[in-house]
Image: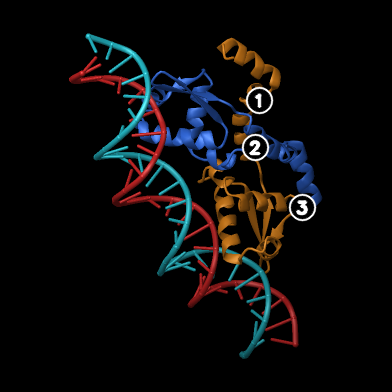
Chain colours: A blue, B orange, C cyan, D red
Amino acid sequence: MPSLDVYQAIAHPARRELLDALRGGEQPVRMLADRFDSSRPATSQHLRLLLDAGLVSERRVGRENLYRLTPAPLAEVNTWISTYEEFWSNRMRSLRDLLDGEE
Amino acid sequence: MPSLDVYQAIAHPARRELLDALRGGEQPVRMLADRFDSSRPATSQHLRLLLDAGLVSERRVGRENLYRLTPAPLAEVNTWISTYEEFWSNRMRSLRDLLDGEE
DNA sequence: TTGACACGTAAGCAATTGCTTACCAATATG
DNA sequence: CATATTGGTAAGCAATTGCTTACGTGTCAA
């Protein structure tokens, strides 16, 4: 459903920080921009990308636009990464190296 | 230690596919390029990025350059994503919505 | 030694990214 | 009402990305 790739969305550090900030609850653009002393348009554009990726939702309240975390799409990344879990376990890596016959 | 951001490295679908392919064991560039019918230089450049991110290692054998999966840096992504796990659980999301007072 | 193969990498180039400045609409405040 | 606040978004522009073509190096095979 999201029109933008999740991997692309979380590739930029600023967008990961935005997601982290939204864990404290929904916040207006102004507050987010001030927190990272980033400009408002830049913040707004990052939020637009996150919206396209389905990672946040927006809710208009008066003249403020409140953004809220909707991290469900992160599950896809989690699923993909999980398939590598066996690889970064030390015991599995040692075994694998042994089977591959590398010193 | 890696000179390139892991999030950046996995942002491109071709690079994720390369990692997936390397789960079957180390492989030379040619074989990887043929599998995705991508050009050899393009593949080589993607592998270079993965190398910079510490996600693969290379080993010269004769005239072939064998690339091997070293997915340890993925653990960083996994750690970050894990902190959102509570959010995409249905029960947690329902509770959170209730506490936030949304419909 | 000669030719083919495997690979890295530079150069060139179109497309994308990410910022800024500037402008507009909508809402709150006096 | 007039003015300030909040925010989206277009336009412009430098930097980056991702491909291709072209070239050089090292290795195997005849």
Cβ atoms at labels 2 and 3 below 8 Å apart: no
User: For numbered disc 1, what is the local secondary structure?
Assistant: helix
Circle 2 sits on which residue?
A: A77
User: For numbered disc 2, what is the local secondary structure?
Assistant: helix
- The type of residue carrying mark 3 is Gly
- Whether marks 3 and 1 lie on the same chain: yes
Q: In the image, is B13 to the left or to the right of A51?
A: right
User: Which label sits in the foreground, 2 or 1?
Assistant: 1
- The type of residue carrying mark 2 is Val
Q: In the image, is A13 to the left or to the right of A37?
A: right
Q: Residue at x 61, y 50 (%)?
A: B13
User: For numbered disc 3, what is the local secondary structure?
Assistant: loop
- Whether marks 2 and 1 lie on the same chain: no
Q: Residue at x 56, y 37 (%)?
A: A53
Q: Nearer the viewer, residue A12 or B91?
A: B91
Percent x, y of residue B102: 57, 14
Residue B67, label in figure: none
Percent x, y of residue A14: 45, 34
Q: In the image, is C27 to the left or to the right of A92?
A: left
Residue B24, label in figure: 3
Q: In the image, is D13 to the left or to the right of B93?
A: left
Q: Residue at x 58, y 26 (%)?
A: A70
Percent x, y of residue B24: 76, 52
Quadrant in the rendering for residue A1: top right
Circle 1 sits on which residue?
A: B88
Cβ atoms at labels 2 and 1 below 8 Å apart: no
